[in-house]
Amino acid sequence: MTCPFTARTRLLSEPDAVVTGGPVVRTALPGGPAVWVVTEEALARRVLTDPRFAKDPALAPPEVTDLEPSAAERLSLTTADGPGHARLRRAHAPLLSARALARHAGRARALASALLEGLGPGEVDLTEDFTTRYPLAVVLEIVGAPPGLLDDAVAACRAMWSPDPSVAGAAFGRLQAIGTATVTDGTGDGVAAGLRAALPDLTDAQVGYLVFGLVFAGQLTTDAALGYVVAHALDSGLAGRTAEELDALVAEVLRVHPPAPFSLWRFARAAVDLAGEALPAGAPVLVDIRGIDAGPVGHPLTFGHGPHFCAGAHLARLELRTVLEVLRDRFPDARPAGPVSGLLEVHPGGPVGARLAALPVRLHPAR
């Protein structure tokens, strides 16, 4: 099979690399250690709820690099397990519920409208700025970041893709500083303030890292998802679509183009048999979300499953649906500038999702 972790570029009309075999396939990272990929839905759901597979990078073999700090070093939703993780989820859940986020819908719509209207006439590439700036603008307001940090956050998110490790590392540091500043100097009425109140024993830096996680993960995935959602929505047409139909469109595009094609890493706590495969202690395990969702599936794994189901799922849906509503209502003549099948998809390699290299559109009728 073609290694699914290899960086590559393809047209949307071309078939993508797939993980073949199963229900567990042993492969390897480029130049790295073995990794086991779960390719069958029922087994995937078991793995994602099985305490024998943990998220803490402290369990990873030393050959697996570019991981988050361990839970002991930097407590986060994506690295904690067990009761510690459950406590963090309880603190986040009411702040990121559909009901809590509904009060931000009007502001998200205003931000999307202003950013799109500022692009002007003619052909524009939405991936040049909009798909990065819009989700950052929304999430910074929701967490309660101090005013004036959007441009810095946009620059940091762009720099994270630098091939220079020092540049990328500095960018992560800038985003973490924004997280801490949101706790210490924020508006006082956002998610950061709610987490500060719910987790009084954590330091400001620790709560700031939780806020950083929300900003980083929310931007990274929604940025990628926006390109696919808008491309397919404009190609199929938005006129007359109800909110329910827009939600269904978003769900279907995310099923086909999940912003996270694989689950985040899990590591075997001890040697374990998984569907006949003998995994050693520390074995890295991924779930092939894109591959599983491409087949008959009871409920898509787009946002994961089990205790680590995406905490920002409601926020992502709100952001994506809001952009489609704005395009439907304010830009009825918006169309892709060319065939969607001719768009290029760039895979950076690894579990990180693919994104469109460009999304040229015409928001206004040609004059």
Image (tube, helix red, strand yellow):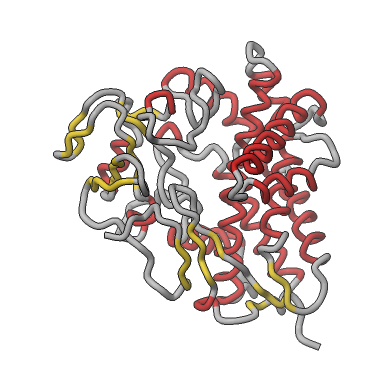
The residue closer to the viewer here, 208 or 114, is 208
Along the horizontal axis of the image, is 338 left or right of 151?
left
The extreme top residue here reads 201
Q: Is residue 99 visible?
A: no
Q: Residue furthest left?
A: 276
The x and y percentages for residue 45 are 32, 40
Which corner quadrant holds the C terminus? bottom right
Q: Is residue 139 left or right of residue 310?
A: right
**Residue 361 or residue 109, whichever sits in front:** 361
- In the image, residue 294 sits, relative to residue 186, either above or below, namely below
Name the quadrant containing residue 186: top right
Q: Is residue 356 above or below residue 135?
A: below
| Farthest residue, direction bottom | 367
Which residue corresponds to the image point at 35% horizontal and 42% vertical from the top-left? Answer: 32
The structure residue drawn at horizontal position 40% and vertical position 36%, both measured from the top left corner, is: 64
Give the percent coordinates (x, y) of residue 135.
68, 50
| Viewer-proximal residue among 166 and 175 | 166
Quarter that holds the N terminus? bottom left
Residue 54 image point, x, y percent: 37, 28
| Residue 123 visible in rendering | yes
Q: Position of residue 137 (x, y in %)?
A: 75, 48
Q: Quadrant of residue 47?
A: top left
Q: Which residue shows up at 39% across the image and 52% down it?
A: 5
Question: Which residue is located at x 73 percent, y 77 percent?
Answer: 123
What is the number of callouts on the image? 0
**From the viewer's perspective, is 64 left or right of 145?**
left
Q: From this view, report whether residue 242 is shown above or below residue 207.
A: below
